[in-house]
Image (cartoon, grey):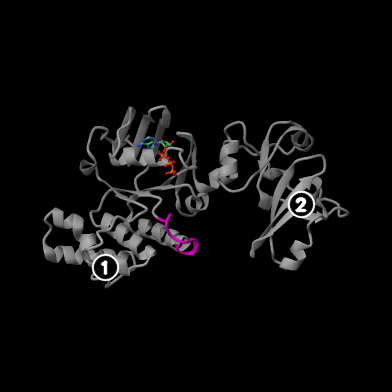
Amino acid sequence: MTEPPAPAIRLDHVSRSFGEVTAVDNVSLDILDGEFFTLLGPSGSGKTTCLRIIAGFDQPDAGRVLLHGADVTQLPPYEREVNTVFQDYALFPHMEVGANIAYGLMIRSVAKPERVRRVAEMLDLVRMPGLESRRPSQLSGGQRQRVALARALILHPRVLLLDEPLGALDLKLRQQMQVELKAIQQQVGITFIYVTHDQEEALTMSDRVAVFNVGRVIQIGSPAELYEHPASPFVAGFVGVSNLISGELAQRITGSAETFSVRPEKISLQAVEQPSPDGHVSVKGSVRDVVYLGVHTRYLIELEGGGDLTVVEQNRDTTSMDVMSARGRQVRLVWDPKHNRRVSDGGGAALDPAG
Ligand code: ATP
């Protein structure tokens, strides 16, 4: 039998402390060759420290880093087949775009005709053909980030590390660049390791995501797995909006007081006098807050007997006037119990509707 190929990156029981702070706490994970893999977590959860350890800018106190099966823990950054793109671009302001992109080739003494050819190839890849002679100051934020990407990719690293590369861009441009980055990654087929605290960004681009909290990996999975089967209340709350239900209400709904979650878009609002469909969960409440968001509306519902739930509904047949007038109204919340997810057992399993 042939051995499965070594992962592009393996972190093997990696820890790193700064004084009293444990930035990375015994993290083990495998990132496959060609994967778009995201380290997602709140500020200070250890994502950047992990990335710096992979790049070789920082050393773990314990554990090993393997690149394509080889232990590189002791190697300096320039001896690792990885390259990094940072949020602040780090372009040379006095050099033209072409020279910025060709920089790595120049210090490797690659001949000029080949440099020119490869720079043109890279500018095509990042959809900026013909802009070799611009200066960074003549570019938009999105274009600068593309140049930074081209400069990193021209050296054909086997792994590209990206630390919040879109963080400085406005929302619209960021969303556009997310789609482009993913397309470029698929085109070049290189392993991308991406750091972000933005869950939507992580879900949009990644093949798999590792969710970090206080230095630990809480869950690793595809965007759909994390969203539909969060393994802990932390993941349920951090990846998308989630309603956590516990105690008496949970007991009434599932027959057990154990905490479960249900996503806001799985719940429908209807008039209290309308009967709920057979086999569905039905809870009464009143609308405490309404946020009209164009495509959809977010309602905060105060439940009879205490607690509240968030519900999101598409504005298919409703106008902003309709939804705003819902405030204070008595409503019935209805959902199929198959959307209840246990969140305290580490598995994020669907609950047995029978309880
Ligand atoms: P952010 O999204 O804010 O960049 P992060 O998840 O990337 O956060 P890290 O930058 O890895 O988190 O930091 C993890 C913890 O380690 C934080 O508490 C941080 O203050 C601490 N830390 C990181 N680098 C250093 C350092 N060089 N010296 C001291 N403490 C550090």
Residue 157: image location, x then y, percent: 26, 50
The total number of labels drawn is: 2
**Circle number at residue 288:** 2
Picture residue at 42% right of the left edge, 61% below the top: 177
Q: Residue furthest bottom?
A: 130
Q: Which quadrant of the render holds ligand 1? A: top left
Position of 298 with respect to 328 (left or right) is left
Position of 265 with respect to 302 (left or right) is left
Picture residue at 36% right of the left edge, 59% below the top: 184
Circle 1 — which element?
A: loop
Specify the segment rendered in magenta: 166-173
Picture residue at 26% right of the left edge, 58% below the top: 151
Residue 159, placed above or below residue 231: below
User: Which of the marked residues, 1 or 2, is nearer the chain's N terminus?
Assistant: 1
Q: Label 1 amino acid?
A: Arg
Determine which residue is flagged by label 1: 135
Residue 339: image location, x then y, percent: 68, 45
Q: Is mark 1 within 8 Å of ligand 1?
A: no
Picture residue at 21% right of the left edge, 63% below the top: 95
